[in-house]
Image: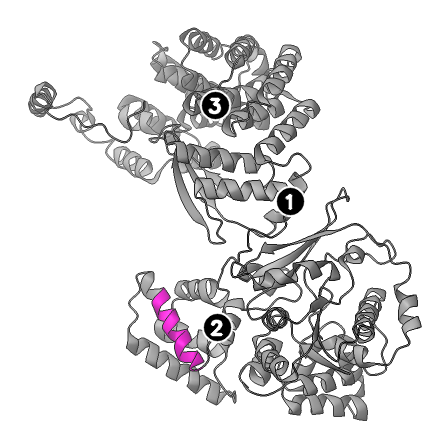
Amino acid sequence: MTVEYFGIRHHGPGSARALRRALADFKPDLVLIEGPPEADPLVPLAADPAMRPPVALLAYAPDDPSRRAAFWPFAAFSPEWTALRHACATAVPARFCDLPAACTLAPEPAEPLEPAESPEPAESPEPAESPEPAEVAAGAAVSGTAAGPDVERLLERAWRDPLGVLAEVGGQGDAERWWEDVVEHRAGEDPFAVVAEAMGVLREGRAPHSAREEQREAHMRQCVRRGVREGFERIAVVCGAWHVPALRERVPAARDAAVLRGIPKVRVAMTWVPWTHGRLAADSGYGAGVRSPGWYQHLYEAQDRVVERWMAATARLLRAEGLAVSPAHVIEGVRLAETLAGLRGRPLPGLEEIIEATRAVLCEGREEPVELVWRRLVVGERLGSVPESTPMVPLRGDLQAEQRRLRLKPSPEPADRELDLRKPLDLGRSVLLHRLRTLGVTWGKPASLGRTKGTFRENWTLVWHPEFDVDLIEAGFWGTTVVAACTAKVRAAARAADGLPELTALVEECLLADLPGALPAVMRALADRAATDGDTAHLMAAFPPLVRALRYGDVRETPAEGLLSVIEGLAVRICLGLSRAAASLDDDAARAFLDQINGVNEAFTLLDEEPLTTRWTAALAALPDRPGLHGLLDGRITRLLHDLSRLPDFQVRMERAVSPGHPPSRTAAWLEGFLSGSALVLIHDTPLLRLVDTWLAELPEPAFIDVLPLLRRTFGRHSGPERRTLAERLRRLGSAPAVLDDAPDPARSGLAATAALTILTTPDPSPIRTEGDQR
């Protein structure tokens, strides 16, 4: 009987290549892999052709209210994945031997655990390959030379970062770069003996640094003993290199049993889920991650001419983005990378040299293309896939069926989608995205609608993250299908809602997500709350979402019985309480109330109900004459009424607003409210522009300094073309009146009128229905 320990680096392509050769030579009859034993039934799925890494084992506690979960990711270049594939290909049993996920996910008050995300969540055991650095480390640690305190510091740090310690002893400050030199660029060498020796020196005479670490290693030894008892003759143990010395140590079984006795456990379920390279990267918060998953994928797959193939792939990417990159650029880039490696004493160019050569030659010193190369190639965002036979929660299965039906494929790269709600397929996609947002799965983020596209178009940005699988597990509490879960969650939210705005948002959700089963319950709660809420500000906050919901319901052909009656009741109560709500407001309150007035006014325009709109206009018209009205509100309401042609005395009101009788700060606030949204009224009304200019020019210097920030804020919100046109007209204010006269030239307007009549009176022999025509 032989037990062979293969100490690997998690997600190390050099370890994966060496392990593939070692397993082929050793020919084990049992493979033990660091990972949760609950995943043993899922091992055969690794042989399915539809299983394409990166993927991850997902463990979750279905009975835990906090829905704790843990991931164990695998990439194509992960040694653990290589071991799984070897076992499946040779029909050899494969088992996971780490501490069970039932223990990992159980709460442990005495020593809180960080969420497990990998086969090595606590540290990243990083093996060495070159015998020279290992011997240096061993000699320094054992001899205790003059740098004794430094050696002790390094050995203490080894529990957290063994690869970093070996790199520092080997004279390198970058552990990733050191790893590339001693492992990735030395194909064909077996690193396992040297790795075991180096880790043994770093761990010599030191107990595990935590109870959890001791429990993990005790359970691994128990799994090895079980394999021996079952009669296996050649057992291969694939684990983090840091654990190899502990697993080789002769520890009594009774002591390991005592260490494992009494560990809290919870019921867990496990499955495979797709993963991404972005989540394998160390900067994503994954403790055992690597800096450059895409680069490591290339190192694992490229059999020869690693640098040349990489540079060629970089050139293809840059050319696809419209940059001029020729074969000569590739040749010179390879030469520069090799020259840099030679100057720095490296066996082959590493990622640092390749990126520097890419920046200098292929990107000609520009950082933006380098960032693109880093994102697309070095990290290399890609999404794995799992076979349909993979066990999953019912909600996840229903979502996959919907994704296939609607032809919406998840992708880790941001993708913009414009949906036309008049088309059944796009309408179904919109409904699904809104339903997922209701469940807390933000696969799609809606963009603002363009003013010229109407309510029948939506713009979305879609990005799929692996964590959404955990969100779907949590959402599975509400139902087994997407629509059932959304309906149950919205009903519960309606019962628990405290305010009118929450209920109006739920109405909008019901219509956007097409939830007719939840809408009646929300409407009843909304009607009850609207009848008792007397706060005009609350009513105004609730009014625009309800109007949008009614409008979206029309476009989506979703029934919204009773919604119009609720809107009519709110409109009447808003108009009655508007005057009282606008009284005696300070600056902050006036600014907040201004936003509400704008929202309600837009809602009345969208509603297009003449009696209600007339009543709203009358309520606005009664406000400017009230004493004590804040200047910001006075200006904005005056502008709204002026746009509706409801102010025959507008010139008088304007002169009174900018008269010296008002404090400059109040006049500036009035102008801010009046000009908010658009400066066209000043551009096309020369007397008004002259009046404002005169008021500003006659301000005393202290008053001008006081109102300048308000004026800058007012005009800074206008578009660039508006500001340029306004500045041009101000420059010409001193010219002759005819220059600024906006009246059209009779000769030119006559020609334009003749041309327009010709176009309008010519029959159209072939009327064309454009895409923008609504049904």
> What residue is rendered at 17% in x and 21% in y?
743
Lower position in the chain sequence, tag 1 or tag 2:
2
Residue 99 place in picture, x, y as percent: 78, 63
User: Disc 3 marks which residue?
Assistant: 548
> What residue is rendered at 41% in x and 18% in y?
605
Residue type, mark 1 in image: Val
Single out the mark in the foreground, 3 or 2: 2
Q: Is residue 697 above or below residue 26?
A: above
Secondary structure beneath dot 3 equals: helix
Residue 57 place in picture, x, y as percent: 65, 58
Left or right of 560: which side holds 423?
A: left
How far apart marks 3 and 1 lie (CA) works out to 35 Å
Residue type, mark 3 in image: Arg
Left or right of 216: which side holds 418?
A: left
Left or right of 444: which side holds 365?
A: left
Q: Is residue 105 visible?
A: yes
Residue 298: assigned label: 2
What quarter of the picture does the N terminus occupy?
A: bottom right
How far apart marks 1 and 2 lie (CA) works out to 34 Å
Secondary structure beneath dot 2 equals: helix
Q: Main secondary structure of the magenta part?
A: helix
Residue type, mark 2 in image: His
Query: Does 315 appear in magenta?
Result: yes
Range of magenta residues: 304-317
